[in-house]
Amino acid sequence: MTVDSSSIHEGDELPLLHIQPSLGMVIRFCALQWTFPVFFYDADAARAAGLPGTIVPGPLKVGLLYRAVDEWLGGAGWVRQVRAAHRRPDPTNSPIDIAGRVARVYEEGGKRRADLELAIINQEGQPSVRGFAVVEFH
Amino acid sequence: MSTHLATLVLVPEQSLLTDEVRALIGSETPAGTVQVTPRGWRHAVEVYTGRVPAETPAPGESVSGYAIAALETENGGTSRIPDLMPNSLLIANQWEFERPLRMGETLTASSRIVDITERFGGRFGYSIDFRTESVYRDATGAVVARGGITMTQYDVRDARSEEGAG
């Protein structure tokens, strides 16, 4: 589905993206970056570092925010920027929801753009990540 | 022990932000070249979406920004951050694009430490934040993309909560 950029308004909500990041996803991410902090895949090491267990890497979560925005755009534009402020760890295999809202629609450089407010919501309903994105429509 | 004294003992007697550490601010790693490859793009799409793409974009075609995560493999942008504290966590990060990445293009990468700051008595106790940026330029020198991260280093024994992100 492609969003209709001409009918986007401030306050519009993005569809919730429901994901359950698995340990397999985390390990594939580590391989992509070729960096393997032990607390991402070893529960004992994670607890020794003060974490509740293995967690979803922050850089993976910014990509999941990107995915939520990209899927909402559906080819109607492209993502210029995505930012994430990490508030709480998300344990692996725990479901999360990615929520978003159009905060501003504007013209810049002759292009129609929108600012989006984003959040990753954990099982307890708490935001584990506060995010922000800028998109440009074709 | 009073609350005030308990707070005081969490702070080192001397700042860990020595002149040697501060001198790292602004210093750039030697530039290297990276490429948006079909393999890197496919792997990135698989990681972030869980789907195996049916087709690979043609050379020069726009690709999703996920590919920047595969570019960072080549750069190793944060490797020069000194280990001043025993634990570290990512607290913020971002991707920025001036235009979509293109399949097959070669970019020149550089990274630098933008800022180093110390915090007293936050949720991690005494902690040090490192903000770094990787910049990717095309053959004309124009900036195509940036990746930024903020890491905090802390001692888990002084942290008041498990907040942070990874």
Image: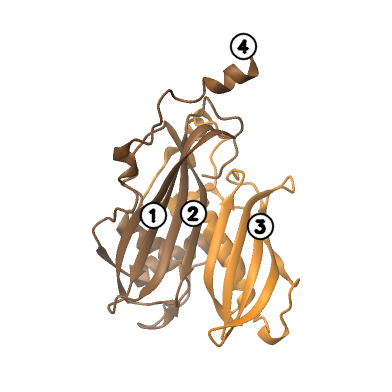
Chain colours: A orange, B brown
Q: Check if mark 4 and mark 1 are on a common chain.
A: no
Q: CA distance from mark 1 to mark 3?
A: 24 Å
Q: CA distance from mark 4 to mark 1?
A: 46 Å
| Mark earlier in primary sequence (2, 1) | 1
Q: Nearer the viewer, residue A20 or A3?
A: A3
Residue A119 disc label: 3
Give amino acid for label 1: Gln
The answer to which quarter of the image holds residue B75 is bottom left
Q: Position of residue A1 (x, y in %)?
A: 66, 80
Q: Is residue B23 visible?
A: yes
Pointer 4: what residue?
A: B1
Q: Secondary structure at mark 4?
A: loop
| Mark earlier in primary sequence (3, 2) | 2
Chain letter of disc 3? A
Residue A33 disc label: 1
Q: CA distance from mark 2 to mark 4?
A: 40 Å
Give amino acid for label 2: Pro
Pointer 2: what residue?
A: A59
Q: Are marks 2 and 1 in contact (CB under 8 Å)?
A: yes
Image height of A106 relative to A92, above or below? below
Q: Are marks 2 and 4 in contact (CB under 8 Å)?
A: no
Image height of A68 relative to A137, above or below? above
Quadrant the N terminus of chain B occupies = top right
User: What residue is shown at x 44% (from left), y 80% (from top)?
Assistant: B62
Chain letter of disc 4? B
